Amino acid sequence: MTIIQINDTVGAIVRDHPALSRLFEQVQVDYCCGGQKTLAEACAKRGIDPQTFLTELETWAATTPPPEVNLTDLSLTELADHIERIHHAYLHTELPRLEKMVTKVAAVHGDKEPRLVQVKGIFLALSAELKTHLMKEEQILFPMIRQLEASDTLPTFHCGTVANPIHRMELEHDEAGEALRELRQLTDDFTPPEWACNTYRALLDALHTFEQDMHQHVHKENNVLFPRAIALEQQIAF
């Protein structure tokens, strides 16, 4: 059976066993922004028995086939390319669509469900922040990481070290994570009321998918790409 320790960080567990992210999603354990917490700490925060959940994780890990793409086998350049191709491309397409949907649903049903107006405001603000965030990663941070990997000596960056923009991105990830938690709370875990129309239901389903993709996206950056980039920079420097 796969060995997972109670003191392993949840980010490392999902890094090594990506399929287990489904179990973390089910119990709402944060493995992306909160990826540095140990399994014991994360379970305690959610009021989950850690040993019972550990047994469930090990059973899943032992019976689930490995992923088609093992992130730890990718170079930093390949990993940055993967994140842009899968997650950035999704956001570039999905954010404008969701902006229209949330605006329409809030206008039509906001009188009956006032929280939809809050959902609209939070999502539109998050969408604007994410568009700027993606631009900074695609035009500044990811090119720095690719340059670092291609260099034998430490490159000179305008912002000092690669760790500086990484720290900024991680702070923005935390802010996005808080917005996602508010959206989940305001929508009763993305559950439509009985009277909801098809567009309302489609919006909540799309927001749920958006949340799941964001969790995977941030996990790959916070717990895989960023630590490896910082480690490489330190290795070259010394």
Image (cartoon, grey):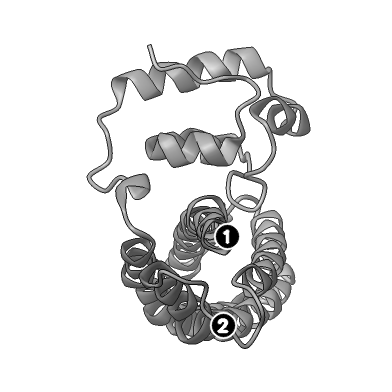
- The label on residue 203 is none
**Relative image position of residue 212 (x, y in whole percent):** 48, 54
Residue type, mark 2 in image: Thr
Taking the spot 67% from the left edge, 77% from the top edge, the residue there is 110
Rendered location of residue 171, percent (x, y): 71, 67
Which residue is disc 2 drawn over?
156
| Residue 104 seen in render | no
Q: Could you say where residue 169 lies in the image, as x and y percent from the top left?
A: 63, 71
Query: Alpha-carbon neighbours of circle 1 within 10 Å: few (<14), some, or many (≥20)?
Result: some
> What residue appears at the point 39 percent right and 22 percent down from the top-left corner?
60
Residues 139 and 92: in front is 139
Q: Distance between the residues labelled 1 and 2?
A: 15 Å
Residue 163 location, quadrant: bottom right
**Does 32 sit left or right of 66 as displayed?**
right
Instruction: Give the residue pinned by disc 1.
Output: 230
- When the figure is inspected, residue 133 is found, relative to residue 183, above or below; the finding is below
Instruction: State the residue at coordinates (37%, 46%).
Output: 72
* Label 1 vs label 2, nearer the camera: 2
The amino acid marked with disc number 1 is Ile
135 above or below 219?
A: below
Disc 2 secondary structure class: loop
Q: Residues within 10 Å of mark 2 (few under 14, many from 20)?
A: few
Quadrant for the N terminus, please. Answer: top left
Along the line of sight, the residue nearer the viewer: 121 or 215: 215
Of 64 and 228, nearer the camera is 228
**Residue 222 is at least partly visible in this image:** yes
- Which element type, helix, strand or loop, lies under badge 1? helix
**Horizontally, is 106 left or right of 206 in the view?**
right
Quarter of image, res 175: bottom right
Identify the residue shown where x is 31% and y is 71%: 85
Mark 1 or mark 2, which has the lower sequence index?
2
